[in-house]
Image (cartoon, helix red, strand yellow):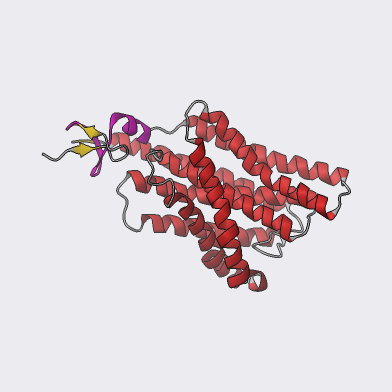
Amino acid sequence: METVSCCVCQEPLAGNAPHLGNRAYCAEHWAKLSQTRGSVWRSGVIYVVAVALFALAAALLLRSLQPQLSQGGLMVAGVALALVPAALWLAFFYLQDRLEPEPKGYVLGVFVLGALLAAAVSIPLMRNLFSVQDWLGQSLLVDLLGSILIVGFIQEFLKYAAVRYSVFNSAEFDERLDGVLYGTAAGLGFATALNIYYVVSSGGVNLSMAAIQVTVTALAQASFAGITGYFLGRAKFEEEPVWWLAAGLTLAATLNGVFHVLLGNLVRSGSALSGQTINPWLGLILATVLAAASLAVILGLMRRASRLTLAGADMA
C-alpha cells in the first residue's frame, strides 16, 4: 500500500488524513490551510493608514520648515525618506510576529532579493534597453500598452520570481497567507530600490514631494506583489489549472500599468519610472485607495478559500 505523506512537511499520514484534491495534509498544516490570521490583516490595515499619515505629516512639515540643505544633504535625507515605508512595514510585521511567528530571515531575504532584482534587472532593462523615459507619455494608448506590457510585466515578473524561486519550495512556506506576506516583502524591497534610485538619479529631491512619492511607490508595488502572492499561495496548496499563475501575473501587471497611467494623468507625471510629479496629493490618495482595496479583496478571497476548504474537505 502506498504511503501517504503531508504535501508540506512530508510527514507520513494515516489513511483518514484530510485531503484537498490529491494533496494530503497533516493536522498542523491542515489547520494552517484553513486559518485567516486576523492579526496579519489588522497589521496591514494599520500599516496602510500609518504610512499614508507619515507621507501627509512629513510633506506638510517639510514644506513648512523648508530646510536648507546642500545637494549631498538632500540626497541623504531623500534616501532616509525612501527607507521609511519599508521600515514601518517591518515594524508592524515584527509586532504581529510575536503572536504568529514567521521566519524573519526568510522575510528579510525576500525583501533584499526584491530590492536587488529591481536595481540589477528592472531599472537597467527599462532605462537602457527599452528606454521608456524617451517614449512613454506620447499618447494614452502608447502609455497604456507600454506601462502594462513592459513596465508592468517586467516589475511583476521579477517580484514573482523573488518568491517563486526562493522561499516558495521551502517548508516555511506552509500556508496560503505566506504567499501574500512574502509577496509584500518582495514588493517593498522592489519599491525601496526604485525610491533610492529616484533620489540618487535626481541628485537630490524636493523633500516634501519625495515623502509622498516614496510612499506612493511603496504602497503600489506592495499591493501588486501581494496580489501575485495570493495566486502563489493558492497554487502551492491547491490544484489550480496550469494557467493560474500566468493569470495572476497578468492581473498584477495590468493593474500596475493602469495604475501608472492613472497616476501620470492625475499628477501630470513626467515619467512612469522616475515618478516626477507636479501635484502629488492625488497620487497619494490613489495609492492609498489601491492598497486598501487590494487588502480588502485579498482578505475576502482568503476567507472564501478557507470556507471552501473546510466545506469541501475530502477525508481519504
**Is 251 drawn above or below residue 33 in the view shown?**
below
Instruction: Report the residue at 68% width, 50% height from top.
Output: 214
Q: In x, y percent, where is residue 74? A: 80, 51
The residue under the point 61% across, 34% down is 91
Q: Quadrant of the N terminus?
A: top left
* Quadrant where the C terminus is found in the figure: top left
Where is residue 210 shown, x and y percent of the image?
Answer: 74, 51
Residue closer to the observer: 59 or 162: 162
Does residue 156 sit above or below 293 in this rendering? below
Camera-side residue of 17 and 116: 116
In magenta stretch: residue 20: yes
Viewer-nearest residue: 30 or 314: 30
- Residue 89 picture location, percent across and down: 60, 39
Q: Is residue 8 above or below residue 215?
A: above
Q: Residue at x 55, y 62 (%)?
A: 121
Residue 102 colored in magenta in the image: no
Q: Is residue 124 above or below residue 164?
A: below
Residue interval drawn in magenta: 14-33
Residue located farthest toward the right when viewing the structure as drawn: 68
Residue at the extreme left: 1
**Left or right: 281 in relation to 305:** right
The residue nearer to you, when weighing 64 against 258, is: 64
> Which x, y percent locates residue 207?
79, 49
Task: Please say whether residue 154 is visible from this viewpoint.
Answer: yes
Residue 184 seen anywhere in this rendered image of the structure: no
Q: How many marks?
A: 0
For residue 108, what is the image quadrant? top right
